[in-house]
Image (cartoon, helix red, strand yellow):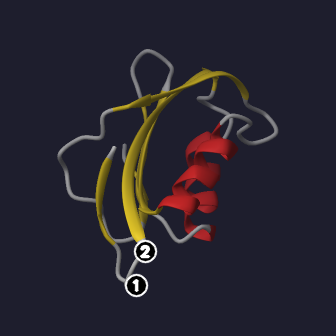
Amino acid sequence: MSQVNGPEEGETEVGRAFRVRGRVQGVGFRWWTRREAERLGLRGRVRNLPDGDVWVEATGPQVAVEGLARRLRHGPPAAVVTEVREAEPTKLPPPVGFVIDV
C-alpha cells in the first residue's frame, strides 16, 4: 500500500490493488467496479486477467478505498466472489478518473 498526502490538509491518500476471484468475468464486474469507485471519488483502473480473475487498483482517501475493498467482496448481483486478495499496486500513476483497461 502506498501513501501520499491528499489534496486536503491532513487527509491521507492511499493506493491499493486487489485481485478478485470467482465468477467475476462476463457479469459486468468491471463496469460495476468503475461505477462504485466513481461514487467514492476514487481514481484507478480495473481489468480482466487471462486466468478469469479481475484486477483492481484504486487511489484516493483511505476511507473511500476501504469502502471499495468491502464492496469488491460482494460485487454486482450476477457475480460470485470467492476471494479478494490485496496485492502490490503497479508503478503506473493513477489515471484521471477510474478507467476500464482492456
Do labels 1 and 2 touch, CB within 8 Å? Answer: yes
- Relative placement, left or right, of 44 versus 63 is left
Type of the residue with mark 2: Glu
- Write down the quadrant of residue 96 in the picture: bottom left
Q: Nearer the viewer, residue 60 or 56?
A: 60
Write the residue at 82% across / 39% down. Answer: 77
Image location of residue 49, percent across then percent down: 41, 26
Image location of residue 95, percent across then percent down: 30, 64
Query: Which residue is the site of mark 1?
Result: 8
Instruction: Decide: few, some or many residues near mark 2? Use Cα within 10 Å; few <14, some 14-19, many ≥20.
Output: some
- In the rendered image, the residue lying farthest to the front is 10
- Relative placement, left or right, of 71 versus 38 is right
Image location of residue 4, percent across then percent down: 27, 64
- In the rendered image, the residue lying farthest to the top is 51
The quadrant of the rendering that contains the N terminus is: top left
Write the residue at 38% across / 65% down. Answer: 13
Instruction: Decide: few, some or many residues near mark 1? Use Cα within 10 Å; few <14, some 14-19, many ≥20.
Output: few
Task: Give the vertical position of 19 relative to 50 (above or below).
Answer: below
Q: Nearer the viewer, residue 51 or 75?
A: 75
Task: Give the vertical position of 5 relative to 27 (above or below).
Answer: below
- Write down the quadrant of residue 72 in the picture: top right
- Write down the quadrant of residue 47 in the picture: top left
Type of the residue with mark 1: Glu
Write the residue at 69% across / 45% down. Answer: 71
Q: Nearer the viewer, residue 65 or 78?
A: 65
Write the residue at 40% across / 67% down. Answer: 12
Helix or strand or loop: what does disc 2 sit on?
Answer: loop
The quadrant of the rendering that contains the C terminus is: top left
Image location of residue 100, percent across then percent down: 43, 52
Query: Which residue is the site of mark 2?
Result: 11
Task: Give the vertical position of 84 relative to 61 (above or below).
Answer: above
Helix or strand or loop: what does disc 1 sit on?
Answer: loop
